[in-house]
Image (cartoon, coloured by chain):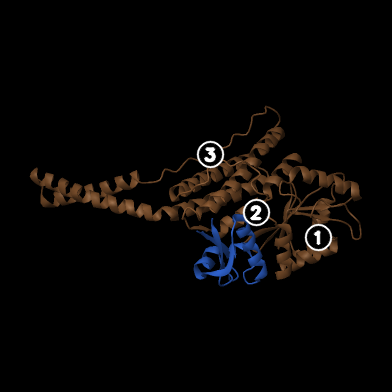
Chain colours: A blue, B brown
Amino acid sequence: MTRYEIMARTIEPAPGQTYGEWASASNWVASGQHASSFYEAIRACFQLAALHPHLTFVPFARVKAHA
Amino acid sequence: MFEVSTMDIRKTIAPADAVGVVMNLLNTDRDRPQMAWLTWYDGLVRLPVLTAVLVDGHGAAWINESRQLLGENDPTGDENVLVMTPAGEEAVLPGSALTLTHSELSDVLTDFASGTPEVGFEVSHGWRQGRPPHPEPALIDVPSTRTEVIAALTSLGARADGMATALTAIGGPISLEAADYAWEIGAAIDQLVRRLTAPERKRVTVIGALASVPLAGAAGAALRLADATPVQALVMGVVAFVLGTGFVAVLGRHEQPKPKLIDPPETGGSSIERIRAAVSVLRPALHALLDDLERVCDAAGAAGVDIDLSPSMIAAVQALTPIPARLTIWADHL
């Protein structure tokens, strides 16, 4: 069974910053949330993003899946 | 900002104007159910907000017609559908669809655009309940080993590319949007496979280099015996080393399967009929692709494979979830 770990970015993008620039300037940290299925993990990303205004959207969260 | 799109119109609007613009667009034809899609974006990110907005122009009969349309075409159920009704009107609503008056919708959109967390949570919680479990038969064997996981992912990447190609060939706003997301998934899977196979590729290169050392030595020694100068022998030895390393690396490379292209059935009818026929083939294929991706990811952990779903893949999968239904609705409106 895959265990999905929801990750989040530590900083929000600056105005005018490209995705690549922002991605290289910020780090991923574990959010403490986990999911046990693919779509549950994707939903969790959106919920995490919605609950944290500074994260705002799903591309600011990602999923690491491991045993 | 919001982007509002109907079957043939796409425009950017401010949050405060969203409801009015949607209403104007949808009210241009009151004799049939009209649909529009709202997308929120900030330049970096595009996030579908509303999959469908149905405006009640003619009371319960219109709602029932919409309900029938959605019931036939929305395999995800009613959860992604927002039904708008005039303030105070009772409506027979399909399933768990949310009902908002115009002013309530205006408040939701404004709050969403301003990033109010509670509204955002309600949006994702209420309108994005995920997909039903495996509506399409699996086209892929569930992998149980690392090698099988990598092979399955490689195959899925090729399928995503093939799907994107086919959707692009159909054209039209919805199919092109779906094609973009299919390309995203294909690219994300390709990156994932490269990351997973990086240690193996490195190992093969090292083995090739080690195996090429005696080859290079032998080549140099042979040239020396043939009265070549030491420099000539050295140069040929280096050439033999490079060729040997490259040869082993090529031999050890994973074969990339070609995209699995989907051939829509030839109807021999009009272009509209061909588009509808193509969508009827592509929609279940797109569903099956997402389902197989889910199966492979869920099985990867048991196979001892750590995978990293990139933000672009997550966003694409989430965005594609309602699109198979939209494909059919779009084709039906042609």
Q: Amino acid type of disc 2?
A: Ala
Residue identified by numbered label 3: B260
Q: How far apart are marks 2 and 1 (CA)?
A: 22 Å
Determine whether the residue tagged by mark 2 lies in a helix, strand or loop: helix
Q: Quadrant of the N terminus of chain B?
A: bottom right
Q: Is residue B331 above or below residue B145?
A: above
Q: Chain ID for label 2?
A: B
Q: Is residue B59 left or right of residue B322?
A: right
Q: State the residue in front, B221 or B152.
A: B152
Q: In this view, does A6 lie above or below B334?
A: below
Residue identified by numbered label 2: B319
Closer to the N terminus: mark 3 or mark 2? 3
- Place of residue B315 in the rendered image (x, y in percent of width and height, measured from the top left): 61, 57
Mark 2: few/some/many CA within 10 Å (<14, 14-19, 20+)? some
Q: Which residue is drawn at 67% across and 67% down?
A: A50
Q: Which residue is drawn at 35% across and 55% down?
A: B202
Q: Which residue is drawn at 37% across and 53% down?
A: B200
Residue B220 visible in this rendered orientation of the protein: yes
Q: Distance between the residues labelled 1 and 3?
A: 42 Å
- Place of residue B308 in the rendered image (x, y in percent of width and height, measured from the top left): 51, 59
Q: Do the residues labelled 3 and 2 touch (CB within 8 Å)?
A: no
Q: Amino acid type of disc 3?
A: Lys
Q: Chain ID for label 3?
A: B
Q: State the residue in front, B190 or B230.
A: B190
